[in-house]
Amino acid sequence: MKKRLKKWMGIAVIFVLVLTFNGCEKAGEMKTDTETASSAAYDNSYCEDGEPSAKLNELRESGTLIVGSSGDAPFAYIDQDSDEFVGVDAEIIREVGKRLGIEKVEMKLVPFSELILNVNSDNIDIICDCMYLREDRAEQIYFGDIWYTQGGGLIVAESGGINGMDDFDAGTTVVGYTPGTIWQTAVDKWLAEGMIKEARATGDQSESIVALQNGKIDAFLTDSTVGENLFANFSDTVQGLKMAENYEDSPETIGRIAPGVNFNNIAFIKEVNNVVKALREEGFIDKVFTSYKLDPALHMISNEERTHEMNTRNE
């Protein structure tokens, strides 16, 4: 009886070992199959040699691309009614994220003057906020391809008597700007040349509009796209104001807009470039401008015009 029991116990142990071995082998095979299926689910055609960058793999794993923006419409901001991340830059980067296999694209509100600091501190993954290509910035971050172009717009009071720079009074005129933008440089230049009395930092576009309506400043220099958007879509917000008809851009204020990343993520921004190139070819970017009641003809470029030589480093 004991011998027979030992015999059956031995058979049972062998049977369990066989099942365990086979089970582990099958589990391993299933894991591999899952990984393969997951990898195949991504479109890597935008990646160099079909291999995603380390940053893209990281973002696919985390599921979220964090976009830095100062929250100015119509570029990249949170809509107060829908609580969604919207705007021209937002629509583009959201579609980029979708095509690269990143589950979510979220905005982090950052003052414009602190965007570069935040991307270099890895608090955000990418800057998408109508940022002009500039040599000083290219020494700190790596710029992607140009998305679109724009100039400036001078917003003034309807009853203020200013229709352009020729109407400035060196003894009284105060012009506002958002700190850290090209417009600060332009307004500071007006001050240095004795065209105006004061160049005043008035915060973001909302704060500056209120300052202008309350007579704290005589004009506000900002992106032409901001003016287009405000007067086309938010006429109540700019009540009593107008665009100065005789304002003229100087060469340095005609901007080329591009996203930016830190120098560790150059391979990733090149993947972004490839997606945006495809979006432009498909007419997607034209449609984005039109959807925000902006004239594509004033801003769009061709894919042949998208590249630049501003970057100071390579991979």
Image (cartoon, rainbow, N blue to C red):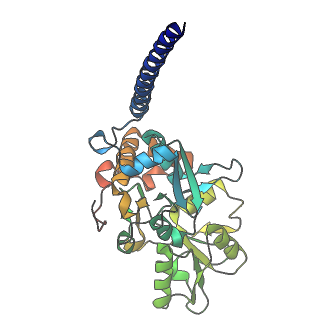
Which residue corresponds to the image point at 29% horizontal and 68% vertical from the top-left? 312
Which residue corresponds to the image point at 46% horizontal and 40% vertical from the top-left? 101
Q: For the image shown, how many numbered marks are present on the structure?
A: 0
284 vs 172, left or right, is left
Q: Is residue 61 visible?
A: yes
Quarter occupied by the N terminus: top right
Question: Toward which corner of the image does residue 41 lie, by quadrant?
Answer: top left
Which residue corresponds to the image point at 57% horizontal and 55% vertical from the top-left? 107
- Where in the figure is residue 172, as x and y percent of width and height? 62, 90
Quarter occupied by the C terminus: bottom left
- Where in the figure is residue 281, as x and y percent of width and height? 36, 41
Q: Nearer the viewer, residue 236 or 280?
A: 280
Q: Nearer the viewer, residue 311 or 24?
A: 24
Which residue corresponds to the image point at 62% horizontal and 74% vertical from the top-left? 203
- Where in the figure is residue 278, as x and y percent of width and height? 37, 41
Question: Toward which corner of the image does residue 196 lie, by quadrant?
Answer: bottom right
Relative to 12, does residue 159 appear above or below in the rendering?
below
Relative to 33, does residue 199 appear above or below in the rendering?
below
Outermost residue, front side: 2
Q: Is residue 73 visible?
A: no
